[in-house]
Image: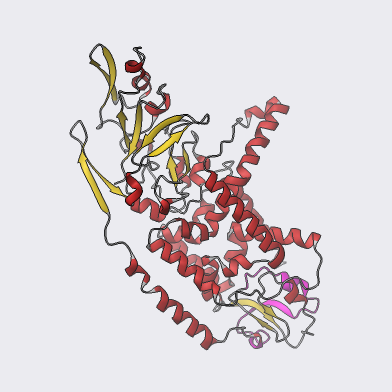
Amino acid sequence: MLRNIRRILALFVWFTATLTLLGIVRAAWVGRVQLIPALLSLNAGLLVLLGLLTLVFGRVYCSVLCPLGIFQDLIDWLSRRFRRKSNRYGHPLSGHLLRPLFLIIGIWGFVESIHWIPALLDPWSSYGRMVTQGLYPVWLWTKGLLVSFNGTFGTWFEREEFVVQSTLALAIAAALTVFLVLTSWIWGRTFCNTVCPVGWTLSWLSRLSLFRIAVDRSRCNGCGRCEARCKSSCIDAAHGKVDESRCVVCFDCAEACDRGAVGYRFRYSRCSAPSGSVVSADESRRHFLSVVATLLPLPLVGKAQEIIEEGWLEDGTYYRTEKLDADSEKRVKIYDRQGRLVTERYTPIMPPSTYANFRYLKLCTACQLCVVHCPTKILRPATTEYGPAGILVPTVNFTTGYCDPDCNRCAEVCPTGAIQHFSLARKQRDKMGVAVFNSRTCVAVTDDVECDACVRHCPRQAITTVVRGNRKVPKVSANRCTGCGACEFYCPALPKAIHIEGLLS
């Protein structure tokens, strides 16, 4: 009964998360209930709720709310259909040594602003990249196929062509998918109990949970079915013990036991008391204190200060830009699908309502939700735009469109608050960047033709034409320009005669 309830809830969460990451539905709550996004957004109420949930029921978060954990369960279910073994899972080699190591690496990457490290370890972001980079192209191909076979599907779907936005992001997602499929097929939930920092953090609370999986020694005959079936390798059938820190409360062991010896019981009931835990209380306490002692110095290792660049725009507007690292002065070259140079930027462009680069890069977990839900597809995973530390964090590229002034989907779906929620009225005022004009590539100068594409398409009327010599050329009002990118997108010149430079402060 409990196993079936867990499965129904888990499948509902997994389908909702997958459909949201594919852009089919917009259920932003499924990202916000994840532990790492809740922690980064300082959602104290949700953090307390998840903590109480674990203290009462154990690590049900990992088996019901985490899409990556549910994905591993699906792989496990498939493996049991094709590989029937009586003793599939053994205790992993990692023991209790690698588990805190990955947590320390994640915290160190966060403190040192090496943002791709915690992004790779976060289960929600990892599953997001797997879907958006791997399954999303399949969904686009399926939509196009349906529309081709039957025109009535055109009223439901729009045919979209998939473009590889980042080869690096695609390669990382593919490598992670292969790794998870192999480890889940062979060893079950090794990732959750060895690599995942969320699983390791919740394991400390689950040791104190009021309800837990326990073995009734009076009924147990030591057959080992529960141990063989446990995907978390947390049962020692020979001694009738369960490692509560590894148990994800999937109820598979209870289903496998035909004597009713394994069950989900109240901690202080008579039959669950002898079960105990594989790890003693003194050992756990010493282990916990050693990890805390290792983590405490980490906040002191951060960077001393940020390098600030400041100046004045041509119309008298003051600006300040925070450089990410020594490589931020290098221009980023942007090419179109034919390999032609479109434009070069000194400063990368962040999504709207992000304001400060240090805040955006700290809070973003690179789950790619905003990338999928952007209707004009201008958001894409970064490679070199933010420097080595900002790999996979979404940046703005205007080769496929521009930022619609009447759209705030990226803020609606962002689970961490890296893209702060904003009203459409506020978007008319907030800046993403400022347009910069280069007369050396403008067709009005090079080809001696009249062109006012940037003037006509600017939604803010921030661009006018002025006469220089015998030609009319654009002039940008930095006060009115919000950096939406319409001018850059519609500019017919290659490289672009007008492009957007980001303002990172």
Picture layout, residue 342 above or below residue 181: above
Color theme of the render = secondary structure
Nearer to me, 182 or 409? 182
Residue drawn at 53 percent across, 86 percent down: 283
Residue 10 appears in the rendering:
no
Nearer to me, 130 or 174? 174
Q: Position of residue 142 (x, y in %)?
A: 68, 36
Which residues, given as a range, are shown in magenta? Answer: 247-274
Residue drawn at 53 percent across, 48 percent down: 169
Q: Position of residue 431 (x, y in %)?
A: 32, 38
Question: Left or right: 16 with respect to 1?
Answer: left
Residue 467 is a magenta residue: no
Question: Left or right: 115 with respect to 164?
Answer: left
Residue drawn at 24 percent across, 32 percent down: 479
Picture layout, residue 414 above or below residue 316: below
Q: Position of residue 104 (x, y in %)?
A: 46, 69
Question: Left or right: 130 with respect to 389?
Answer: right
Query: Picture quarter containing residue 315?
Result: top left
Image quarter hosting the N terminus: bottom right
Residue drawn at 43 percent across, 46 percent down: 384
